[in-house]
Amino acid sequence: MICKIYGKTRLSVSAVGFGGMRFDVSRGDEDNAKLLHYAFDRGINYFDTAPGYCEDHSEDIFGLALSKMKSQREKFYVSTKGMPEDHDTAAKAVAAVEKSLSRLKCDYLDFYHVWCIRRAEQYELAMRPGGQYEGLLRCKEKGLIRHIVISSHLRGPEIVRIIQNREFEGILLGVNILNFLYRWQGVEAAHQAGMGVVAMNPLAGGVIPKNEKQLAFLADPGETPTEAAIRFCVSCPQITVTLVGFTTREHIDAVCRVADAAKAFSQKDIQRIRRHITKNMNQLCTGCGYCMGRCPKDIPVASFMQYYNAKVLTGKTDVEMAKELDFQKKWGVLADRRADAKDCVQCGRCEMACTQHLDIMRRLETIAQWEGAE
Ligand code: SF4
Ligand code: SF4
């Protein structure tokens, strides 16, 4: 496993991180805990979890595994998270850290994320005097946390603003081979600022493995699109850790194999992918962002169209799309929206700007029906 330096912390972390959000809970915590040991033996030393993952089993599974790795504590890094809304005072933030430490059976956490910042107000809440960030600073002084970091679904310019404030040593972002055109501004800014950059969702929420035939253009000869997607994140110099949610040993083996041989994408490769996404996949939103800032109702058109990509690529049913919409509004690309699809007044400005000439207004009408079905 190749390692990379996590920003200014200078820690050497594995290029692939263990994401604790995909355990098969039916197997039992003990069995799942063995996956962490297996990954550690394969050279993975970055372990990321959060309260609530996997029906709230994940931190306990980590605790079972990490308690047996204590003698090697300096050789791996543990990351977890807390949301500003749940811990809106410094005291609550300290209590959350202490609870995670107890569940994870650790004396300290290497990385603690101000979690899931979807709107600027959530960031302001975390940073206000007496708020979560102040509590985390106290934990850091006491040696309970080594590095305070942030996880965000904000778009490029908003992330750049947070990065410029230099309160965090690293950032966790949803970036992958399909949405990088849209997400790159934040990645680049964080890297330039000397932050560690952790990529979540490298397989676009399963869109890539489920649509390998349509996405064959992502891959080199002899490679699958899924392998190309992992290789893309792992080989980007701007991305420090690529988080993969593991369910089986076979997953770990497959991803380690790709990472070990990860050849960087050349500018020519990137241009090829950009061209294909733009020309051959002309029903897909490429995330170029040209429609942004034009909507009089403040509808996040690009985010809605990114979500609609799943319909184009997989032909999901209306029921499946409604379910996916609910998820995206809570946790994904639509979490920071200020308006819904039903708020569209059909002014046409977004369609005028769309580089893909997407029928955005018709799509929003369809999405509004799914909104009604949520
Ligand atoms: S057509 Fe709808 S989504 Fe597009 S800019 Fe106008 S109001 Fe916004
Ligand atoms: S302009 Fe079109 S392709 Fe580009 S982000 Fe907006 S909806 Fe997507």
Image (cartoon, rainbow, N blue to C red):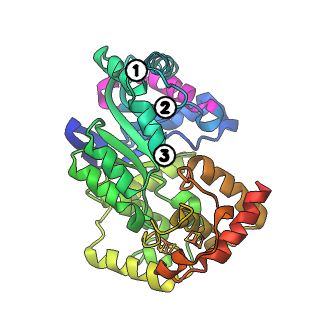
Mark 1 or 3 closer to N-term?
3
Residue 63 within the magenta-colored segment of the rendering? yes
Residue 182 position, x and y percent, is 41, 65
Quadrant location of residue 163?
Answer: top left
Distance between the alpha carbons at the discs numbered 1 and 2: 12 Å
Residue 252 visible to an observer of this rendering: yes
Q: Mark 1 or mark 2, which is nearer to you? A: 1
Q: Please state which of residues 358 and 77 is positioned toward the viewer in this rendering.
A: 358
Image: 109 above or below 167: above
| Residue 130 numbered tag | 1
Image: 67 above or below 17: above
239 sits to left or right of 183: left
The amino acid at mark 3 is: Arg
The amino acid at mark 1 is: Gly
Residue placed at 52% from the left, 60% from the top? Answer: 204
**Neighbour tally class for label 1: few under 14, some 14-19, many 20 plus, Cα within 10 Å:** some
- Identify the element where label 3 is drawn: loop
146 sits to left or right of 23: left
Distance between the alpha carbons at the discs numbered 1 and 3: 20 Å
Q: Which span of residues is magenta-colored?
A: 56-76
| Residue 249 numbered tag | none
Residue placed at 28% from the left, 50% from the top? Answer: 190
Residue 135 within the magenta-colored segment of the rendering? no
Q: Do the residues bearing badges 1 and 2 touch, measured as CB atoms within 8 Å?
A: no
Q: What residue did someone put label 3 on?
A: 119
Q: What residue did someone put label 2 on?
A: 84
**Neighbour tally class for label 3: few under 14, some 14-19, many 20 plus, Cα within 10 Å:** some
Residue 177 position, x and y percent, is 42, 66
Q: Please state which of residues 148 and 251 is positioned toward the viewer in this rendering.
A: 148
